[in-house]
Amino acid sequence: MRRAGFLRAAIGAGLIAIAVAAGAAETAASVKVFVLRYKRVEEATLLVRPLLSDSGSIVLQARINALTITDRPAPLAAITQALSQFDVPPRGYSIAVKMVRARADASAGDLSREIGGIGNKLREVFRFNDYALIDSAVLAGAEGDSVSYLLGGEYRLTFRIEPAGQGTTLRLAAFSLARERPVPGPGGRHIVSPLFRTTLNVGLNQTLVLGASKEEASKKALLLILLVQENVRPGAEKGTSGIAAAEKRP
């Protein structure tokens, strides 16, 4: 005698999955609905399609940000695991920034206390004699955020935090530094002079030093010292996700 079908619901950190199975056979097709909370279903489709069997199918419901997938149990299990790791809250980061003015046409002075131990390393790597801290800040942002901050009252730092997946390298796109000088008179206008623009791949918990000068032989330069650290997601370990499953049978 054939057993009645059953309803299965699974709820993860962001993912909500509902499965309806027609029978218990390993080859029987099942229908599973995934409702994503943090990522778009259009992005999830690129992840899911390679995991479908030849007989599998996928239907998008963009209005409710859901995927309806029909396939055999084995592919559905792989898809469930992949989506549970994909649909998690954006990773958040703290980005410590120090701006330092470096000079070669000055006698070696005491390294600013705020620069810390990196000061001696700078002297070993660069040809400059004097280093002075202009400004420092700790910037916060999550994957997908655009960040903008004015350093020292005149240097505008901007960048966009790209999704890092589960990796330990953070990609800062459109990373740019520009000097903003006010124009005398009403209107609050500024003259903006771009200093550099690039894309950075920054390792977590590793110090990165960038330099900007008019030319290679210049006796003056601006240095940016970056240190990126990941913030722990509320109620979760870094980069982790899990699914709790509940089963209901008539």
Image (cartoon, rainbow, N blue to C red):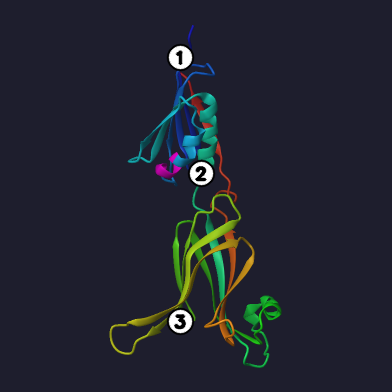
Magenta residue check for 233: no
Residue 245 position in % (x across, y down): 53, 31
Q: Is residue 17 above or below residue 37?
A: above
Q: For numbered disc 1, what is the local secondary structure? A: loop
* Chain-order first, disc 2 or disc 1: 1
Q: Could you tell me which residue is drawn at 43 percent across and 44 percent down?
A: 43
Look at the picture and state if 72 lies above or below 124.
Answer: above
- Circles 3 and 2 in contact, beta carbons < 8 Å: no
Circle 2 sits in a helix, a strand or a loop, which is it? helix
From the image, state whether disc 2 or disc 1 is nearer to you: 2
Report crowding for label 3: few under 14, some 14 to 19, many 20 or more residues within 10 A (C-alpha). Answer: few
The three-letter code of the residue at mark 1 reads: Ala
**Residue 87 rendering spot, x and y as whole percentages:** 49, 44
Label 2: few (<14), some (14–19) or many (≥20) C-alpha neighbours in 10 Å: many
Q: Is residue 204 toward the left or the right of residue 47 in the image?
A: right
Identity, as a three-letter code, of the amino acid under mark 3? Gly
For residue 192, side relative to residue 247 (left or right): left
The numbered dot on residue 86 is 2
Q: Are marks 2 and 1 in contact (CB under 8 Å)?
A: no
What is the C-alpha distance between the residues marked 2 and 1? Answer: 32 Å
Q: Which image quadrant is residue 147 in?
A: bottom left
Which image quadrant for residue 182?
A: bottom left
The residue that disc 1 covers is 4
Badge 3 is on which residue?
A: 153
Mark 3 → mark 2, Cα distance in angstroms? 40 Å
Q: Residue 250 at x, y = what percent? A: 45, 18
- Which circle's residue, 3 or 1, is located before the other in the chain? 1
Which of marks 2 and 3 precedes in the sequence?
2
Element type at mark 3: loop
The magenta span reads 41-45
